[in-house]
Image (cartoon, helix red, strand yellow):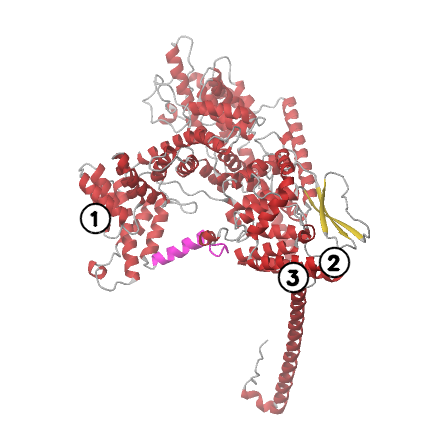
Amino acid sequence: MLRPLRLVVCILLLGVFLALAAARADAHSPVKAPAKQQQQQQQQQKQQPPPPPPSPPPPQLNTPPSPPSNAPAATAPTAAAAGSSKAQPVKSPTTETASGSAETDLYKLLNSTVAVLESLPRKRHRLVPQTDDLLFAVSERLAQKFLPASLYHRLDEFRSNQRAAAAAAGSAEHSASGAPHVDDAAAAAIKGDAMPVIDVGDRNSVKRAKAVAILTRLGEKGIMEAHEVLGDMFLIGRYAHPRNASVAFEHYLRPAQAGRPSSQRMIGLMHATGLGVERDYAKALLYLSFAAVGDDTVAEQVLGYWHIKGIATHANCEDAAYHYQNVARKAVDRYKAGPPGGLHMPLPKQRLPEQEGGIYGFGASGPGDPNLRQGHGINQGGALSTEDMLQYYRLQADAGDAMSQLLVGQLFYLGSYNVKRNYYRALEYFRRAASQYPDRAALEGEEVSQGVKQTATAAAQAMYYLGLMHWRGEGVEASEETAARWFERGRAESAACLYSLAIMALDGPKKNPGLGLQLLKQAATRDPPSPEAQARLGEYHLALGAQEIPNAMKWFNAAWRRGNIVASYHLGNMYLSGAGMGSPNCHFAVTLFKSVAEKGDWHAPVVHAAQDLMRAGDVEGAFLHYLLAAEQGYEVAQTNAAWMLDRGIYKLRKSNLLDRSQHSSGDDQHETALYLWNRAANQGNVDARVKMGDYHFYGLGTGSGTTTTTTTTTTAGGAGAEEKKAEGSEKPATTAGDGAKAVEAKQLAVGDPARAAVYYLVAAESEYSSIAMWNVGWMYEVGVGLEQDYHLAKRFYDRCLELNPEAYLPVHLALAKLRIKMLWKYLITGGPLSAVARSGKTTLPNSQLDNNNAAGGDDEAARRRRQQQQQQQEERARWAAAAADAEDDEFWRGYNRDREDGGGGGGGVAGGAGDGAGLETVAIFALCGAAALLVLYRQGLVAEERARAAAAAAAAAGAAGPAGAGNGPVEVEQLPG
């Protein structure tokens, strides 16, 4: 009875869900109002009196269009302000109006139209916006999880083609039937110079369509700002408008040709990314250069990154420094122009892979560089999330812990991706922490406990934030006197309070330069010091002249180590000019300027916008912003965009931004991800470099259809394994000589493993990636991409475990398999354990290959490999000498001596390390067998003991009889399991 009832309930719920979805779709569907209703509206408009003169202009809207100096800002619809049910139509300029007045009216109409668009509600995105309904989402998830990758891609492509064909057929039928479309309905209202009338009672979709028609007509009349607004709507999806990159490109093109820097920048970025137009870096460089001449900050940032990395042009550090210096200067100026104490720094950029523990999962890449282990090993196990930590600190704060109250107050004051900024809650926690400041007598005692010191430090820092909020007027009324009192109370324990008092003395209404300089020195030398005070002292010494440059550099270096952008900017200038040092250092100067530009990106917070869109469920919008930010040089954006493509979160063949005919295959998806991984790897992302190796190993996005095979040839002379790469359909060649016994070829990979080994070796040797070390060990073990060498395989497996103890299980399994292979080769085939020891040759690629050029094209990498084939012998010797440890050096000496004594035959391994490896393997298996026998024996003893105990308990219960029932249960000793 319950099952039919559940089925009925499920059907009812599904029906309600579908009905709500249909109602919502109908509410937002682009349907024109009935013709009769439109006629009534037009008659009412004719009967209405002419609109009153415009009211004084309101504050300028936060929109791109900005009227010229002779054009006043737009006013809001006067009918809406007067309480009328319908907005008054905006009068278009007539032929009788002067040209200046006509242009003013056009800008009024532009701003009023933008105001209407701003009033429209934002579009709510679903979590998976690329799905059609719930059933499609479920089927998509199941197909992606259980179907093979090739079959899933074919099914996905088939469904995309069917959907596109159905949409085309529906559009054709819609046009044939004469049913009005929203854009057609809005365009139908335009007759001559007449503009559509946006009524208050119009649906949001109709308002948006009429606004598009108005903006289009304004653009035709020469208002370039209208084209830019339309470009943002069609590309970025502003005002919940559907995206169409090709149409956006046409709208941006006209203002760009008219010389508007913002449109020139967008045209350049679209050419660079292939949005709405074929990718063309030459045109991208041209438009971005014009935009940079027009002082466009984003264009300067893009050009700085391109010049330092050699993208679309030759690498030129001086040009990169010029552009990055301009961006950094603007960021510092904006920081200083903010409220007292400077602008709040933007929140740190989020990495999407960190939500799953990293690109390869929690702890997969290990701690990385041994010198940075503590920094890389934080929260690798994923034990606590941000929400868990916030909950913990809030509980501690409510319990009265001063440090927790300070941390929670900072969280509410600065805001985060999980917590919205709330000045009132921040004030509450800061006041609670400040109230716990201990008495001066308790701090001046002979033995002060760490708890008291920590409470005093937290309370003093809370006083600093209370003074800062009163100084800025954040959550409270601005009062410099109140702020100074809070700073005075916390100056004994807080360098930030000292710095704030110094700024008041230097720049406040009651200036006292001597006192201000004294307070600055105290704040800069306090433990912990104030980096802002150190940077200000550096500026003070720099202004004194060339003789004080060493002192200025000392303070700038101290502040730079603590992340101060002002100090970083001044240091960049000094390294660029060579002031205070022997010679200029352009590359380090560019590094400093780039960090300032990316930390203080108030000019274009595109990465933060992408994060907001991702949280809102707009995957396409997030990918678009990450892709644009990737061209600006943000490594985190490059990683996030590549990860979205790699994981299939966003699919190019379903894109509304790109031409689907050019992105119909999965190869293009991986090709785009590959160049993004490459750029992230060249900026220090170790996992991105390993990903590049994976892509080349499996042939993803490389355009290579090569098949790698391992050919093992066994001869009477003790021949080992040789690796032969066959391209296309060419059969693998063998090198079996006289006395050959067997040839075994096993297909292992599709791609270019030799080139993949380049990236793995660089990531393993130079960047300390444990997963890359494991990959190199496997390639040495199997003989794919590298010459088969069991001893080098063992070395890399051991180094992987040394760097990353979490790799204990896979490394030991790999070592066990490796020892079995070594024992089998020694006992059965009689061949040597190392191909290197046999021939003295290797196919090890040059690990110092320029990865930036290697990932730029297969032809360049192949040409470099051909040029270096003659030098591989010396390279092998140098690399082995640098990488070998003392134990392996002893092994090589003994191994070569035994081979010289044995004459090079199959028995030449006897007496060397081969016997030790074989005996060690036999001993390991003997110990495992003995342990298994002991476990079985112990289990038998435990079973017999339990049986005896059960029999004794049964006998005791039978002897007691019914009279023993009141004596309680019989206690039987429980043996340990």
Label annotation for residue 488: 1
Residue 214 appearing in the image:
no
User: In the picture shown, does residue 890 fall above or below 867?
Assistant: below
Q: Residue at x 60, y 91 (%)?
A: 960
Q: Position of residue 462 (x, y in %)?
A: 29, 50
Are circles 1 and 2 on residues that touch, CB within 8 Å?
Answer: no
Q: Position of residue 818 (x, y in %)?
A: 66, 58
Q: Position of residue 19 (x, y in %)?
A: 58, 40
Q: Within 10 Å of the Cα at label 1, are there few (<14), some (14-19), or many (20+) other Cα atoms?
A: some
Please, what is the three-letter code of the amino acid marked with disc 3? Ala
Lateral position of residue 272 relative to residue 334, left or right: right
- Helix, strand or loop at label 3? It is helix
Residue position marked by numbered label 3 in the rendering: 913
Task: Please provide the residue range marked out in magenta.
Answer: 378-398
Q: Residue at x 57, y 90 (%)?
A: 964
User: In the picture shown, does residue 799 fall above or below 661?
Assistant: below
Are circles 1 and 3 on residues that touch, CB within 8 Å?
Answer: no
- Helix, strand or loop at label 2? It is helix
Please, what is the three-letter code of the amino acid marked with disc 2? Gly
Nearer to us in this view, 804 or 181: 804
Q: Residue at x 58, y 38 (%)?
A: 673
Distance Cα–Cα, label 1 vs label 3:
73 Å
